[in-house]
Image (cartoon, grey):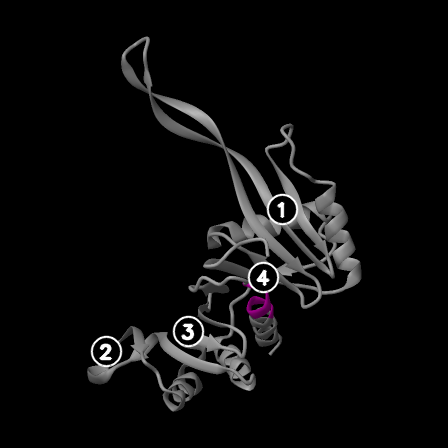
């Protein structure tokens, strides 16, 4: 696993397949970061139709330092190296970027550039209703702790964003049926036979793991598959 829990994973859809995996691997390998470049990639692991690595970028940052000669605080520009972990999974067709959501479009662009734009990468909204139905299809314990709904109409004619906590299974189904496209966040505790963790699923395309796990890989792999299935419809 390229990162450790807890984490944010911002998701985008890939076109799966061996051909696209090879194009991505060769392109990223030929665009390895070195000091002559302002940005590039570093592959940490590859195989089984997946690439784990970092996008590396050098950026100028202004900082205040004390100048001994002038005895004054002055602004100076230093170079900062940023590391953004990511995983390309061409088995199921999903790009996971373990960083702020603002980095997603940049990573999509840079990966496309490195691979010659030979396969599509699409950033799109996560359908929360279908995701919840897919979670329910598994033989897991799913305890929804809260959902956030936009354009929710409350008593008295008021309308706005509303967070509902401690949602029972019957109530959550009712809310999803009536507000499917307006549910922006669903938080749930997921318990499998071997692991237990709390996740947040965001309509924007982010999955957040709130728990600290000794090994993220088994549960995260299954959650990724469920999420990708929700995108498929």
Q: Which element type, helix, strand or loop, lies under badge 3?
A: strand
80 relative position to 35: left or right: left
Q: Position of residue 107 (x, y in %)?
A: 58, 49
Tell me if label 4 and label 2 are in contact, CB under 8 Å.
no
Tally the numbered discs. 4
Residue corresponding to mark 4 = 12
Q: Closer to the camera, 28 or 195?
A: 195
Q: Which mark is residue 88?
A: none
Q: Work out whether mark 1 precedes mark 4 in sequence or the reverse, and give the earlier one.
A: 4
Q: Nearer the viewer, residue 214 or 158?
A: 214
The quarter in which the N terminus is drawn is bottom right
Which quarter of the rendering shows the C terminus? bottom right
- SS at circle 1: helix
The disc at residue 186 is 3
Quadrant of residue 18 in the image?
bottom right
Q: Is residue 224 magenta?
A: no
Q: Residues within 10 Å of mark 3 (few under 14, many from 20)?
A: many
SS class of the residue under badge 2?
A: loop
Which residue carries the number 2 mark? Answer: 158
Q: Nearer the viewer, mark 1 or mark 2?
A: 1
Tell me which label, 2 or 3, sits earlier in the chain: 2
Give the alpha-carbon distance from disc 3 to disc 4, as whole Å: 19 Å
Distance from Cα at disc 1 to Cα at disc 3: 30 Å
Q: Nearer the viewer, mark 2 or mark 3?
A: 3
The residue shown at (63%, 31%) is 37
Please state the extent of the stretch shown in magenta in the rendering: 216-221
Chief secondary structure of the magenta span?
helix
Q: In the displayed orientation, state which residue is furthest to the top.
A: 69
Q: Residues within 10 Å of mark 4 (few under 14, many from 20)?
A: many
Earlier along the polypeptide chain: callout 4 or callout 2?
4
Pointer 1 or 3: first along the chain: 1
């Amino acid at each position: 696993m390229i990162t450790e829990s807890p984490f944010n994973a911002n998701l985008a859809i890939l076109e799966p397949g061996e051909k696209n995996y090879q194009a991505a691997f060769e392109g990223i390998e030929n665009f390895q970061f070195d000091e002559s470049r302002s940005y590039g990639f570093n592959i940490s692991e590859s195989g089984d139709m997946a690439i784990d690595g970092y996008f590396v970028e050098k950026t100028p940052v202004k900082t205040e330092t004390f100048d001994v000669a002038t005895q004054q605080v002055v602004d100076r520009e230093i170079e900062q190296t940023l590391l953004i972990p990511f995983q390309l999974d061409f088995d199921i067709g999903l790009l996971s970027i373990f960083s702020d959501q603002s980095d997603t479009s940049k990573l999509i662009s840079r990966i496309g550039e490195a691979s010659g734009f030979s396969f599509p990468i699409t950033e799109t909204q996560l359908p929360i209703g279908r995701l919840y139905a897919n979670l329910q299809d598994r033989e897991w314990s799913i305890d929804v702790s809260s959902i956030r709904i936009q354009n929710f109409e409350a008593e008295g004619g008021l309308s706005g964003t509303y967070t509902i906590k401690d949602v029972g299974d019957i109530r959550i189904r009712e809310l999803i049926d009536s507000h499917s496209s307006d549910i922006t966040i669903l938080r749930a505790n997921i318990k499998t036979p071997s692991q237990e963790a709390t996740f947040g699923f965001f309509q924007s395309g982010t999955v957040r793991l709130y728990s600290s796990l000794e090994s993220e890989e088994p549960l995260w792999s299954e959650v990724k598959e469920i999420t990708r299935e929700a995108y498929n419809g």
